[in-house]
Image: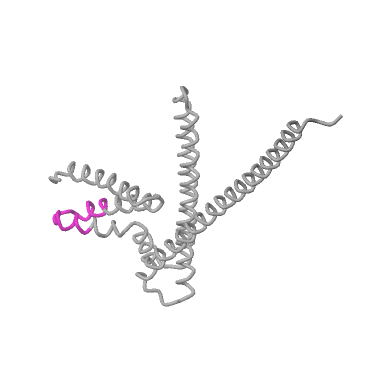
Amino acid sequence: MLKEPGFLNNTFLFIMFSKRHIILSLSFAIWLQLFTATRSQTAVDDKSSQEEAYSQAIAARSRAIVDKLELTDEDCVQRTEQLIAEQYRALREIHDSRDAEIASLKDTAGENEQRVGVLIERVRQDSLIKQFNLHRSFVAQLAVELNSDQVNGVKDGMTYGVVPATYARYLQKLPNLSEDEKRTVLAFLIEAREYAMDAGTSDEKHGWFRKYKGKINNYLSAAGYKM
């Protein structure tokens, strides 16, 4: 039996619509795949660019620190620059890992804030231990390449020269300091520098010096000086 023309037309339209739908679906799928791949590649490129910029920044910073040491052995210059740059990078890895763990714990805190607070403090302590071990190894490697004054020069370079500048200001403002008091003030500043070397930002570095300036002022106030 022959089918009615209307039925044939409807069948034809259905087939054409289905084909069009399939083509559109495939086109969208291809576009989505290309879009996702492009975004992924862009993210990779951005990360690569950021890493390159960071590498250049710490290399320039390390070079500026070593330049002030006035070393004459070019091989020693290169090794020292590399040591400093690697220290900056290793510290960043410790800080980034710490911050990521803390952020993750805060996101899952919910109502158990006290428990999460304990875990966050544990993360901070673990990070400090890693920093301490890294710091000790770094200073030891510097001591192989440099004399004590040059090692201190690196430490001052990594902390913006705060120790000599601040110590000079104390001596200027308080010319009557005894030798013991001078040594105590300098010892506080040097201790602050050891912590500041491992800080991740400029503000954190200066924060350590602010803390120890407070200790110095308390010490000098107790000794009878008007601070």
Q: Is residue 87 left or right of residue 6?
A: left
- Relative to 13, is 142 above or below? below
- The percent position of residue 201, horizontal first and vertical second, equals 37, 50
Residue 77, given in percent of the width and then of the height, sits at 45, 72
Quarter of the picture holding the C terminus: top left
Residue at image position (37%, 73%) is 70
Residue 122 drawn at (x, y percent): 48, 35
How would you classify the magenta stretch by its main secondary structure?
helix
User: Which residue lies at the image location 60% right of the left edge and 46% below the top edge?
Assistant: 32
Q: Which residues are magenta?
A: 168-185
Determine the residue positioned at 48% across, 44% down: 129
Q: Residue 203 versus residue 156: which sits nearer the camera?
A: 203
Which residue is at the front of the view, 54 or 207? 54
Colour mapping: one colour
Viewer-closest of 85 and 109: 109
| Residue 26, picture quadrant | top right
Q: Is 41 above or below relative to 29?
A: below
